[in-house]
Amino acid sequence: MTQIQCENISLAYDGIVVAREINFSLHAGEYLCIVGENGSGKSTLIKGLLGLMPPHSGRIVFGDGLTHREIGYLPQQSDVQKDFPASVREIVLSGCIERGGRSLFYSRAQRQNAAAAMEKLGITDIASACYRELSGGQQQRVRLARALCAANRMLLLDEPTTGLDPVVSAEFYAIIERLNREDGITVIMVSHDTGVPLRHATHVLHLKQKPLFFGTKDAYLQSDAGKNFLGGCADGDVS
């Protein structure tokens, strides 16, 4: 069943249309990688899917009972966020607030949910550590655990490995792939990388203000858009 569908949407930033005529749909458990040059509207599209930026035209339709509260979001991290003086456990637990919690105190179920997310991301042993003292890779795991506390059906990620070294980036992509494959979480990821994310993706959306391509990964690797954008990678590095 279709979980999210974009119907001829256009998106504007400060009154200027940055992406137009976008059409695609995803089913539960699929993995969409959004690629394109800088300024093509990738991050703006993510904000539109989250409801943070209403479409300039067209519409975004949710199906399969999906709501905004069931979508976890991992945005690009600012320098201020990297220096946040809170414990890992506190940051992960704060994701429960976005899921509709209104009490001044976390419930037992919310604490169990946070503990499960930390276990899944392999950060239980640093639950009491200060976030700002962690490495970049550890911080991303904490932020992903928080996103899983906020929602458990769909993840939207905006260039999640920016600033991470290749080894840590590969480890992070492997975690995302496992969440998609084993837990059935739908993934929509904007990435500047052209290797590992595409290897795990089921579908690709290539933007250049207007979509150049939407379809399966295999079809993208054989398309003119894919070959031109990926160069030599299209011959096997991402298949």
Image: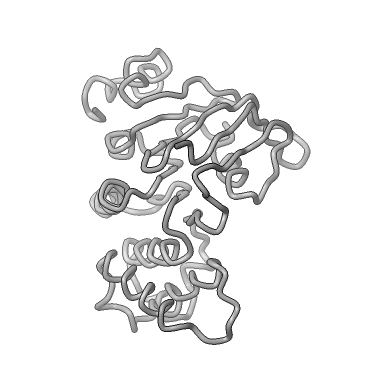
Q: Nearer the viewer, residue 77 or 198?
A: 198
Above or below, comparing residue 228 to residue 160 in the picture: above
- In the displayed orientation, state which residue is furthest to the top: 224
Q: Is residue 174 left or right of residue 194?
A: left
Q: Position of residue 26 (x, y in %)?
A: 46, 35
Q: Residue 66: horizontal and vertical position, in percent?
A: 52, 49
Residue 94 is left or right of residue 48, and the answer is left
Quarter of the image for the N terminus: give it.
top left
Query: Which quadrant of the view contains residue 15?
Result: top right
Q: Is residue 65 above or below residue 132?
A: above
Q: Across the whole image, how many numbered discs are drawn on residues?
A: 0
108 and 213: which is toward the camera? 108
The residue lying furthest to the right in this view is 15
Query: What residue is at 45 percent from the left and 74 percent from the top?
Result: 91
Q: Residue at x 53, y 42 (%)?
A: 63
Q: How is the image coloured?
A: one colour
Examine the rendered structure and indicate whether residue 210 appears above or below residue 158. above
Residue at x-position 64% and y-position 49%: 51
Q: Is residue 7 left or right of residue 89?
A: right
Give the image location of residue 132, x and y in percent: 42, 74
Q: Nearer the viewer, residue 199 or 149?
A: 149
The answer to which quarter of the image holds residue 210 is: top right
User: Which quadrant would the C terminus be assigned to in this image?
Assistant: top left
Residue shown at 60% from the left, 47% from the top:
47
100 left or right of 191 in image: right
Rendering coords of residue 206 (x, y %): 47, 27
